[in-house]
Image (cartoon, coloured by chain):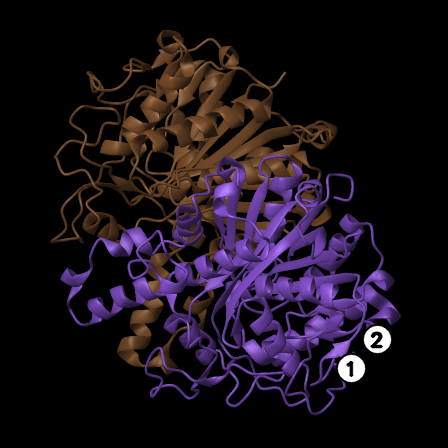
Amino acid sequence: MSNISKKRVAITGMGVISSLGDSSASLHSALCRGLTGAYEFDELNGFEGRGSGRITAFQAEAYLKGRNLRPLDRTGQLVVATAKLALADSGWTAERLAEHTAGLVLGTMFGSVHTIAKFDRHALEQGPACASPMDFANTVINAAAGQTAIWHNLRGINSTIASGSASGLAALGYAADLIRSGDQTAVLAGGADEFCFESFCGFERGGMLQTSEAFPVPFHEARTGFAVGEAAGLLMLEEWESAMARGARILAEVRGHGSAFDASAGEDRAQAARSIARAMTLALSDAGLSWHEVDCISASANGSVHADRDEAVAIGSLLNGRGPDLAVTAIKSMTGEILGAAGALQAIDMVESLRSGMLPAIRGLEQNDPCLPELNFCRQPRRIDGSCGLINSVGLDGNAGSLLISMSN
Amino acid sequence: MSAGPKIVVTGIGMVTSIGTGREAFWNALLAGRCGFGPVRSFDTSRFGVHLGAEIHDFRPEDYVRKLDARAIGRSSQLAIAAARLALTDAGLNAEDIDTERAGVCAGTTSGEPHFIERFDDHYVQGELKKVGREFITRYPCHVVPCHVAMELGFSGETMMIPTACAAGNYAIAHAADLLRSGKASIMLAGGADSFSRITYTGFARLGAIAPDVCRPFDRNRKGMVPGEGAAMLLLELKENAMARGARIYCEVAGYGLSCDAHHMTAAHPQGEGAARAILRALEQSGLAPEDVDYISAHGTGTATNDRLETIAVKKTFGRQAYKVPISSIKSMLGHTMGAASAIEATVCAMAITEGRIPPTVNWNEQDPECDLDYVPNVARNHQVDIAMNNAYAFGGNNSSLIFVASAA
């Protein structure tokens, strides 16, 4: 490791918009009560599979009063609104943003594939001269990050990270490292993906979605796939000393990040599990922590047949008999697979779990798959007495990332 | 950034409309060859413009050996080719690499646009049934670096940074950070974009595509020419490169990334964000404007980009702005989108190594608002110890990267 002294990363605020709530507290409460964002489709006739679906209650106007929303597509609206919530939660006012530079690092799997497709189809049907310049601006995958920077005057780094459903956690790791190295002092980081026809159609054709009636249960013996959902989540990460200096409320600390890739393209399950274990080990060594200092794990598992098993095998391989006392939860049992937002919502709920001492259960997991290693799966919401949580994020194409968050002291 | 271990470029590989691989590409650049021609990838009869910079002689089977070359998208094919060329150029065999500490970081504008374009074709023809599994497994942009890593067996951090036309610079900056913090030992960093109907349609609609040629910084410039391509740079720690006796092109000295927070598709009218990126890159590298020997410009050839980029350079370089040679290889390659700044980074590496600067071709008449030294039309012998690579993007993203000659 490099011996450059690293700065500490404080989490000073969180914003979330999801089908389970639009604040970290309401999200955590819904998760602890075992609610789901399950949603029956009506506009997707001919497609099988179920989703956790669109955030039906989302109205951008409710969050962004009095401004022209036309330049924003749905992804842009979600991110701009979520950024507003996160900025307010962390005490970053417009006045502060005018004087101090804050950045934005957004993880996303698709940007807006709906906007991209709509723009293209309109030009195909009406002719290229009728293509919409406003839509074109939103066809770039970094559009939501750019729109959010414009809306909130975020003049620091503006980056977009794509690692499939591991994007949000990768964005948090990337942003945290920029603060640790001293390159940035304040960065909003997290992820977002909208629910749209194009991506749903893709997952359905890919045979990746849950085929039975019940909402997918991660680690369950009868799992057949995931439910695809929609969400946006952002955390305000600040360099510790500068957060202290401005008197910010510090919620928690990002301790370390690790990431790895399974180059076997999913052909070799043992290698897939090893890459997930490697990400976890790298996060621990990055944080300078050991396993006995970790109190709970937020798993990436979403109901996929192979990926859930790979992750359980990876966790089991590292615990050295500590399996019984290290609680493992999986919030995708309630949020569904929210793609680029997943790591961000897991991180937000981890902060809430550590602060409240209550970890949500894996909804519906009465009996886990007997083929999995014996882990301490949360079958009921669980009191936790600890200060440090590990979050996993595993993509559909070999990306694996882990992030460690601890309560501040 | 100057405090940490030094990061060096030891291999470069590129696939472009004027040449594939370092030697062919560099010779074509110095000769001022252009890659423009009528678009062949799709029918442009309904467009008012027809010019593109496509790659016609690319054979993916020559490079894609482990994966199924026909199953993956063209951006992945181009990226894999650039990666293999960079590895070979660095004198490295994939087998000799500690693959768990080797990663891939790529930039792009559109990822694999052909898969969504095919989806849309099926949609408008009422044949959605024809959409198969390949859409979800081959379309999302992150698959480009994943495919490179799978092909080479790399299993370190693999990431796509889709920050549009500045993406290559963002990818190189992140790769350098990973090496500096000890999270990786070897990084392939660069960018890839394949010729896209969607991108072409958008720029045509904005009136940004040149009808004849791309002539950056010329008074009569009429726009950019969309192109395609890929480039990868092999980055590693200088001490490791020296230990294995590798040829070193240059060091990655520092970077500056900023956001205008002003407009999605138009740059800040005073080049404010671009200037901040330049200053940040200089500061991080511990350098002053008078140290810079060459600027590889974003230089798209649109009226506003070239004017604002000139303003940003003047604002940050002062009188020195008139002394430093600036050139835009987009005058020859067109705008290769997310690959552009990665290809331009390889040009910085070559300029430092060879002491030559590629020209801005098609330049005929000075624009009073663009009155700097753009190295018009003819390549120049010029010692380059320090080169700056500028790139700007939709979303207001600004990036400046600085490469410096590496002392033995």
Which label belongs to residue B371?
1
**Residue B294, horizontal then vertical, whole percent:** 76, 68
Q: Amino acid at mark 1?
A: Asp
| Residue picked out by circle 2 | B322
Q: Colour of chain B?
A: purple
Q: Is residue A393 visible?
A: yes
**Residue B168, horizontal then vertical, whole percent:** 56, 58
Front residue of A13 and A302: A302
Looking at the picture, does residue A92 appear above or below residue A301?
below
Give the distance between the C-alpha atoms of the residues marked 1 and 2, in whole angstroms: 8 Å
Quarter of the image where the N terminus of chain A is located:
top right
Dot 1 alpha-carbon crowd within 10 angstroms: few under 14, some 14 to 19, many 20 or more: some
Write the residue at 18% across / 54% down. Answer: A43
Tell me the element at label 2. helix
Q: Is residue A86 visible?
A: no
Left or right: B205 with respect to B277? Answer: left
Give the mark nearest the N terminus, 1 or 2: 2
Number of marks in the rendered image: 2
Front residue of B382 and B305: B382
On the image, which quarter does residue B13 sit in? bottom right
Left or right: B316 with respect to B216? Answer: right
Q: Chain of mark 2?
A: B
Q: Which chain is brown?
A: A
Residues marked 1 and 2 touching at CB (< 8 Å): yes
